[in-house]
Image (cartoon, helix red, strand yellow):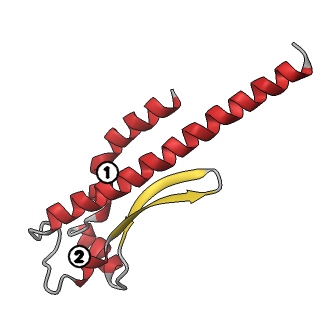
Amino acid sequence: MDDNGIRAVKITIQEIFQRRRAMTIMLCMAYAAKALQNFREQQITDEFWNNQTNVAYNSVFGQELVEGDEVGFFLAHTVEYGVYLELANDRKHEALRPVINELLPEFTVNLQRIWA
């Protein structure tokens, strides 16, 4: 194989990697939205904690995370006391981690489909 052939193979591999990375980011965006939707559907009936003002409920958001080679998604609170909602009483009323963990098996299968 000549230099042009090698260069073409390298470009093709790079393009495949970039497409799969873009699909991974889109998958993370979709699962961040899905996690937020699942949280809201469950918490609207006070499944995790007692909503007295809905401030904490309305402050939860989901987002994809892209930092260098790392890609993922998360749920978070924007209220200062969000950490107490999640960690107090031996995590008795935590909401965010269970919602993410519930989606993890499905997310993993879909991620493997992209990179297989």
Q: Residue flagged by tag 2: what amino acid is it? A: Tyr
Q: Position of residue 79 (x, y in %)?
A: 34, 83
Measured in 3D between alpha carbons, the distance from the residue under mark 2 to the one under mark 1, in whole angstroms, is 19 Å
Q: 96 left or right of 3?
A: left
Q: Residue furthest top?
A: 1
Q: Nearer the viewer, residue 7 or 47?
A: 7
Q: Position of residue 14 (x, y in %)?
A: 70, 35
Q: 49 left or right of 102?
A: left
> Circle 1 — which element?
helix
Q: Residue flagged by tag 1: what amino acid is it? A: Asn
Q: Characterize the local packing of mark 2: few (<14), some (14-19) or many (20 or more) Cα atoms within 10 angstroms.
A: many
Q: Position of residue 78 (x, y in %)?
A: 37, 79
Q: Nearer the viewer, residue 48 or 103?
A: 103
Q: Quadrant of residue 61?
A: bottom left
Q: Is residue 33 above or below residue 107?
A: below
Q: Determine which residue is flagged by label 1.
A: 101
- Badge 2 vs badge 1, beta-carbon distance below 8 Å: no
Q: Position of residue 58 (x, y in %)?
A: 26, 77
> Circle 2 — which element?
helix
Which residue does the image show at 24% across and 84% down from the upper left?
A: 55
Q: Determine which residue is flagged by label 2.
A: 57
Q: Is residue 40 above or below residue 98?
A: below
Q: Characterize the local packing of mark 1: few (<14), some (14-19) or many (20 or more) Cα atoms within 10 angstroms.
A: few
Q: Residue furthest left?
A: 45
Which residue does the image show at 57% across and 43% down from the upper left?
A: 21
